[in-house]
Image: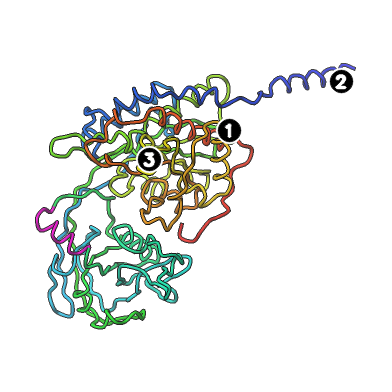
Amino acid sequence: MKKNLLIVALGFLAIACVKEPVDPAIYGNTITSDELRTLLHQFASDEFEGRETGEPGHDMATDYLKEQYVSMEVASPYGNNVYFQEVPLEYQKLPEVSMTINGKKATMLEGFIPSRNVNIPSLNINQIIYAGYGIDDDNYSDYKNLDVKGKIVIVKIGEPVNKDSTYVTTGTKEKSRWTSGRRARVFKIEAAENLGARGVFIIDDSAHNYYANRYQTNNESSISKASNDNDTFSFIITQAFAKELFNDIDTNDTHKVVDVKIELSIKKNAESFISNNVVAFIKGEEKPDEIVVISSHLDHEGTEDGEVKNGADDDGSGTVAMLEIAQAFKAAIKDGYRPKRSILFLHLTAEEKGLQGSKYYTDVNPIFPLENTVANLNIDMIGRIDEYHEDDRNYVYVIGANMLSTELLEINETVNEKYTNINLDYRYSNETDPNNYYFRSDHYNFAKHNIPVTFYFNGPHEDYHKVTDTPDKIEYDLLEKRTRLVFYTAWELVNRENRIVVDKAEKGK
């Protein structure tokens, strides 16, 4: 009898210990336009000097973010009050290059321009591999049956076109990520690098002429990742220069090995420095090893002609949204509702310099294993209205949610319908978007590792990257609503029973 009474008592105790489901709106409603306004007027003030990577204003911004998390009692993932992840970067100028082709001296800026800064004391090349457009994609690859490991590859800008004028890689007439511009060159370099190439020559007359004119008038420093001498080097070259390597390149699309004698040396011209990602962490209660990453970039573009480029929307809006989301989760914890999974708040440096902060986190030094990362919710510009929505301001662009996980898309739509009722605009959520927005913010460095992402974005506006992107132009009621949408999406991701499934993984991500 006593045994039965004990079992009954334990049963009642177990029932009493089960938490009642909580309405996340209680905590979502703590995200307010007034608090966002106060935070943004500080973060995007002249005091932080435009938050240029490598400049004092950027360091002041990182200190400010650390102070905010300390005051909220949101811990560091490192412990010991260490909220900074050091990111090694370089100020790079044109290197010194000596090159001869079949005994003929080549002159920098007159046919070739280095686009990767590495040290190569001496390199003798007897063959190069012509790999057409240098594309390695799901539907088309120039590297099929080509072994380029340790070799020098030469490729051309652009991509092949079908007879009906559609692009081979996409089957549409929209330009793809491989077609043109800096982004296409980066993808072609990365494709060759992933296959082990030692160097890449990219034929692009337009880019060569642009950079040649720029460097002839001002060899200014650019900021890039800290390079390793074993990194794949790359040159932008002209069609005329390419004909020095093999003379029928303008009429021959056949992939081939070309015999050519090249003597090359490169002396890097760079100065190393450290910038910082700011990281804060809420540990999950039931599945602490599963991580949801919420990110935004903290940097902007400094000053222009003595005026501060405040970057209130880009990306002050995403930065303060993260602070409000963190305090909302902290309020829930104080009421006894700690999330099941963990949350990493990741404020990224050097996004404006080529997504360098997120690239370092994902490709070099993730604080938590990428295989344990459930999703990345990236917030970059959510405080304004673009030209398409002047008569329909209740919107946000959702980019990437449909790309890797069906469940992530469904979660965004379900929580939006239940709590925020924003018009979710998917027009940019594809790889063939000519603006390439899917590839242009920090979420992409997670997506390329098959981690589901959602990028929240209000679209470009007339003050983008100008000194006029100031806090007084932010639509704070919209910033509040969009921030709440991210919070509710994160709440569902960290508290649902099962981790979302990656069911749309693609090659090359």
Residue that badge 1 annotates: 418
Residue that badge 3 annotates: 380
Q: Determine the CA span between mark 2 and mark 1.
A: 44 Å
Q: Please state if 472 lies on the left or on the right of 146 as rendered.
A: left
Give the prevailing secondary structure in the magenta stretch.
Answer: helix
The three-letter amino acid code for the residue at tag 2 is Asn
User: Which residue is located at x 27 percent, y 63 percent?
Assistant: 233
Give the mark, 2 or 3, whose residue is nearer the N terminus: 2
Q: Position of residue 286 (x, y in %)?
A: 60, 33
The three-letter amino acid code for the residue at tag 1 is Lys
Task: State the image quarter where residue 284 is shown.
Answer: top right
Quick one: which residue is furthest to the front in this view? 391
Q: Which mark is residue 313?
A: none
The three-letter amino acid code for the residue at tag 3 is Asp
Q: Nearer the viewer, residue 68 or 96?
A: 68
Q: Are marks 3 and 1 in contact (CB under 8 Å)?
A: no
Q: Is residue 143 visible?
A: no
Residue that badge 2 annotates: 4
Q: Nearer the viewer, residue 436 or 493?
A: 436
